[in-house]
């Protein structure tokens, strides 16, 4: 076993470590470290003395050891620092070394033992050695270093600690929301900076400094370690709010990462003004990672695997809350805080959670399921299925940092797009026409099939994905990245290709893999191969040219005529049709054909599932293709098998497309006859 | 084609935040000479700096400035706020307000098209119109365009009169029904602080959501 501490370290050894491995003290001494205990830790060991488990034996052993040798009270802290007034430092002999016990009668914090232990570590600048992950997280949030203990796990039995409440009774499930008109509590003194607030038991704390202010109230740092206090604005102080907080604090939920209310906060008159909660760490997802340069600046060493890990930590929190019949309700990127450690995430604004018949009164359009779009959030109770839509949206926006799933070319209102299930990304032949420009297509393209499938189901099929299923596919995604089966780039710049052909970009000369199918398509359209980056640059140039033209027209005083229509002919059935000028130029610029609505519908309708005659994998294809094959007397092969066959055929003669550098805007236009007059 | 347009497109697609396009249409005619133009400049600087320091708003707000004083000029074009240099305003000439509003509408429209073709979400544009007098050109085309857009809820105009000789009746013709407000004295700074706060509020919402503007805050700078 390897110990993780360094020599000369001053370590506060937590109960969870001592009870598993009492010899840790001797090992610290041998490594010239200085071990400390606190009275809180000693109490917890005492609490575990009774019983026959290994832990209980260890607890008894520790007590024997501490009483066997003489102990003496010290006046000076090792390394000369002063002892806080009121504290007592005792030195024990252990195997020729010294173990110190710090005792404090009156702790600053009264919330639970975790905070008392952290408080001692902070006041004496000790590192906390613990195997309790929750304690690590809470310590870090208040700036105390901790070392996660990695010693032997020799007992299945959990260490029993005073403050750990393992059994939390789930909330009731309710059908109807509280519909009373919220009654504003009258004439209440709202405490501000410097004021004292207290809880029901009379324990008080001082509001030190304003941390943040929102529409509902102000959050203050307090003189209690790791505890902040939310004080509501007068207009938000209603009896419903008070009852809701009282209900919430009836469950002691100490889960690091969830700022669950710890206690009500009362003003000097004893009126309800807010509540205490643990201090969170980090910055909101919205402002720290939802714009590419900001993400790169804040978390320069992050890779895609960190985004996956973030999704998973978020899902585990929500799964935990759902197990207690709590819904987050207002899932949104301003209510999630993150740090550089992507395995941690904080959910704040917990007083808006939906518990029992108290609805979550707020929400945002992007995270609102189609069936509840436009409803007044405070007038109904959400269900898990509503929340599952929000969860899918959050995962999408974490994996495509900041991009809402329905954001698309041509705009449209987000609410309408959600109601119409107008999801712009392509999946198995559906969609893809309006996918947004930029890095988003590459990210989507590189996502594993099962992830895309879940998004497709959520956002096009209006089906809901269970949290456990998400955890499943994301755990797989993580493994795929680790095994290099999926790209670890947050912003990949090329498409994912299976059995690709190394092909030389006709612009920059770099070699990139391309699928035979794509190359065939290019050949058919007489277009040249461009690598991912060059193709992006080409599209950017086209949009920039268009923007410049529009700007010139605006400066000349010529307005764009809204939704100007142009006459076109369907490339398939030849029917005369009309479409918007914008749409047409999009098509021309991307080298696509115009098909009338009827033909598109026909193609979509005629899609059938066929089995590959070689590998018997099922694949979706058009009926037309099957008919064509039948005429030629050929059997159906799936894309992979086709690629393979072509690869075999082509092996030896690497396809190199013409290396003539040619500006893409000059690339051959395939429909000049149809709308030649449109080109400027 | 200038590199500026390419850079602008890259910024556009890489930032997924829903945008709030805002065009400030500012009167810099001869009568603004002296304190008014200085206060306007200072207020505008405060506006740009406040938005720059708001972590959400700075990636959402997109500012463009059209001035009218003698000639109509595009003083500042849309770009990411971080790259924008605050233009220096100077007062001279007549008041071609009609032409300025038409240009602003056309620029906002062109920008909206860029959002649509890139696939970026956006809020309907804002047009902030500030004048201390009355137009010296025909405003009927501008009026028609404003009314068309505001009736379809595709534009919000904030009409602000500066000083006693501002023609509020004329401003009302260019605001699609929103009553113009008269700036109290030269409280430009207070106005721009309020405007940036309004931008912040909107930037924390989603296009299509109703956002209440801080009506009480208007009293710091405006009167009907």
Image (cartoon, coloured by chain):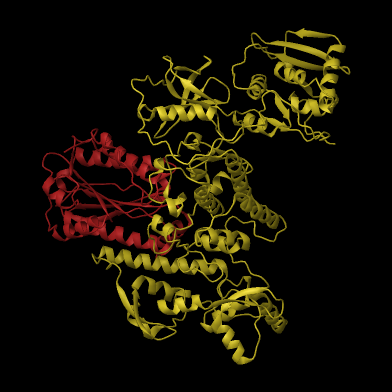
Chain colours: A yellow, B red
Q: Identify the residue shown where x is 83% and y is 25%.
A: A22
List x then y, in percent, for residue B158. Answer: 23, 47
Left or right relative to B107: residue A657: right
List x then y, in percent, for residue A227. Answer: 55, 25
Q: Identify the residue shown where x is 39% and y is 46%.
A: B205
List x then y, in percent, for residue A184. Answer: 35, 27
Q: Residue furthest front?
A: A175
User: How many dots with numbers?
Assistant: 0
Q: Identify the residue shown where x is 84% and y is 12%.
A: A67
Position above or below: B184 against A575: above
Q: Is residue B88 in sight in this rendering?
A: yes
Q: Identify the residue shown where x is 31% and y is 37%.
A: B193
Quadrant placement of the N terminus of chain A: top right
Position above or below: B53 against A537: above
List x then y, in percent, for residue A276. Answer: 51, 25
Q: Front-most of A678 and A417? A: A417
Q: Front-most of A76 and A377? A: A377
Left or right relative to A110: residue A361: left
Left or right relative to A53: residue A518: left
Q: Quadrant of residue B2?
A: bottom left
Q: Quadrant of residue A410?
A: bottom left
Quadrant placement of the C terminus of chain A: bottom left
Q: Is residue B167 in sight in this rendering?
A: no
Position above or below: A82 against A384: above
Q: Quadrant of residue A269?
A: top left
């Amino acid at each position: 076993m390897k110990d993780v501490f360094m020599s000369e370290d001053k370590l506060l050894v937590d109960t969870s470590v001592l009870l598993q491995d009492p010899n840790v003290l001797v090992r610290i001494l041998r490594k010239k470290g200085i071990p400390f205990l606190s009275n809180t830790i000693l109490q917890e060991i005492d609490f575990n003395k009774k019983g026959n488990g290994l832990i209980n034996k260890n607890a008894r052993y520790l007590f024997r050891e501490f009483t066997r040798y003489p102990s003496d009270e010290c006046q000076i802290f090792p390394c000369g620092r002063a002892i806080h007034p009121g504290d007592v430092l005792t030195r024990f002999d252990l195997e020729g070394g010294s173990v110190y016990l710090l005792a404090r009668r009156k702790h600053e914090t009264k919330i639970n033992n975790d905070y008392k232990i952290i408080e001692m570590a902070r006041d004496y600048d000790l590192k906390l050695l613990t195997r309790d992950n929750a304690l690590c997280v809470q310590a870090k949030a208040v700036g105390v270093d901790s070392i996660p203990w990695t010693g032997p796990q020799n007992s299945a039995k959990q260490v029993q600690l005073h403050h750990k409440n393992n059994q939390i009774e789930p909330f009731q499930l309710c059908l109807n929301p509280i519909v009373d008109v919220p009654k504003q509590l009258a004439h209440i003194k709202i405490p501000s900076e410097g004021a004292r607030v207290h809880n029901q038991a009379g324990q008080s704390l001082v509001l030190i400094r304003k941390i943040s202010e929102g529409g509902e109230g102000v959050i203050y740092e307090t003189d209690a370690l790791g505890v902040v206090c939310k004080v509501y604005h007068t207009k938000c102080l209603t009896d419903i709010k008070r009852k809701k907080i009282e209900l919430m604090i009836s469950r002691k939920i100490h889960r690091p990462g969830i700022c669950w209310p710890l206690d009500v906060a009362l003003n000097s008159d004893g009126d309800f003004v807010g509540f205490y909660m643990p201090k969170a760490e980090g910055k909101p997802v919205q402002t720290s990672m939802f714009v590419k340069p900001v993400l790169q600046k804040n978390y320069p060493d992050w890779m895609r695997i960190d985004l996956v890990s973030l999704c998973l930590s978020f899902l585990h929190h929500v799964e935990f809350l759902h197990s207690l019949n709590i819904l987050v309700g207002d899932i949104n990127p301003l209510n999630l805080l993150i740090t550089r450690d992507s395995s941690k995430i904080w959910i704040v604004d917990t007083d808006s959670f939906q518990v029992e018949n108290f609805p979550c009164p707020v929400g945002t359009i992007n995270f609102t399921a189609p069936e509840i779009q436009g409803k007044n959030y405070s007038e109904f109770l959400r269900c898990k299925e509503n929340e599952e839509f929000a969860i899918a949206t959050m995962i999408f926006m974490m994996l495509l940092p900041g991009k809402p799933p329905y954001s698309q070319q041509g705009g449209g209102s987000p609410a309408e797009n959600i109601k119409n299930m107008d999801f712009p990304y392509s999946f198995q032949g559906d969609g893809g026409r309006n996918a947004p420009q930029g890095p988003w297509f590459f990210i989507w393209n590189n996502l594993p099939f099962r992830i895309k499938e879940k998004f497709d189901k959520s956002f096009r099929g209006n089906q809901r994905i269970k949290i456990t299923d998400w955890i499943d596919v994301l755990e797989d995604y993580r493994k795929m990245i680790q095994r290099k089966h999926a790209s670890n780039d947050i912003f990949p710049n090329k498409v994912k290709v299976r059995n690709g052909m190394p092909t030389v970009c006709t612009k920059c000369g770099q070699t990139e893999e391309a699928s035979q199918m794509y190359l065939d398509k290019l050949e058919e359209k007489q277009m040249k191969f461009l690598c991912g980056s060059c193709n992006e640059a080409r599209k950017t140039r086209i949009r920039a040219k268009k923007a410049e033209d529009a700007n010139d027209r605006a400066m000349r005083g010529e307005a764009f005529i809204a939704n100007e229509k142009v006459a076109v002919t369907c490339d398939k059935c030849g029917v005369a049709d009309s479409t918007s000028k914008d749409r047409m130029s999009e098509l021309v610029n991307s080298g696509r054909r115009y098909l009338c609505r009827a033909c598109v519908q026909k193609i979509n309708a005629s899609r059938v599932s066929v089995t590959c005659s070689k590998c018997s994998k099922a694949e979706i294809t058009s009926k037309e293709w099957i008919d064509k094959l039948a005429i030629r007397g050929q059997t159906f092969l799936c894309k992979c098998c086709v690629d393979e066959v072509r690869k075999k055929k082509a092996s030896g003669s690497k396809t190199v497309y013409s290396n003539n550098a040619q500006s893409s805007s000059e690339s051959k236009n395939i429909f000049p006859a149809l709308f030649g007059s449109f080109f400027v | 084609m200038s590199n500026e347009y390419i850079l602008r497109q890259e910024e556009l697609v890489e930032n997924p935040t829903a945008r709030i396009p805002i065009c400030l249409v500012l009167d810099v005619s001869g009568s603004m000479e002296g304190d008014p133009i200085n206060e306007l400049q200072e207020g505008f600087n405060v506006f740009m700096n406040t938005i720059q320091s708001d972590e959400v708003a700075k990636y959402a707000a997109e500012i463009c400035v059209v001035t009218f004083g003698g000639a109509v000029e595009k003083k500042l074009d849309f770009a990411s706020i971080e790259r924008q240099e605050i233009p220096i305003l100077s007062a001279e000439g007549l008041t071609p307000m009609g032409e300025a509003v038409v240009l602003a509408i056309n620029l906002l429209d062109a920008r909206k098209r860029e959002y649509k073709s890139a696939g970026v979400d956006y809020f309907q544009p804002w047009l902030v119109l500030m004048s201390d007098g009355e137009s010296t050109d025909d405003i009927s085309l501008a009026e028609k365009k404003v009314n068309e857009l505001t009736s379809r809820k595709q534009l919000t105009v904030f009409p602000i009169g500066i000083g006693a000789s501002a023609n509020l009746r004329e401003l009302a013709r260019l605001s699609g029904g929103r009553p113009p407000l008269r700036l109290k004295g030269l409280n430009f700074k207070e106005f721009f602080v309020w405007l940036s706060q309004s931008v912040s509020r909107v930037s924390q919402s989603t296009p299509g959501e109703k956002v209440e503007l801080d009506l009480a805050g208007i009293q710091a700078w405006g009167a009907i």
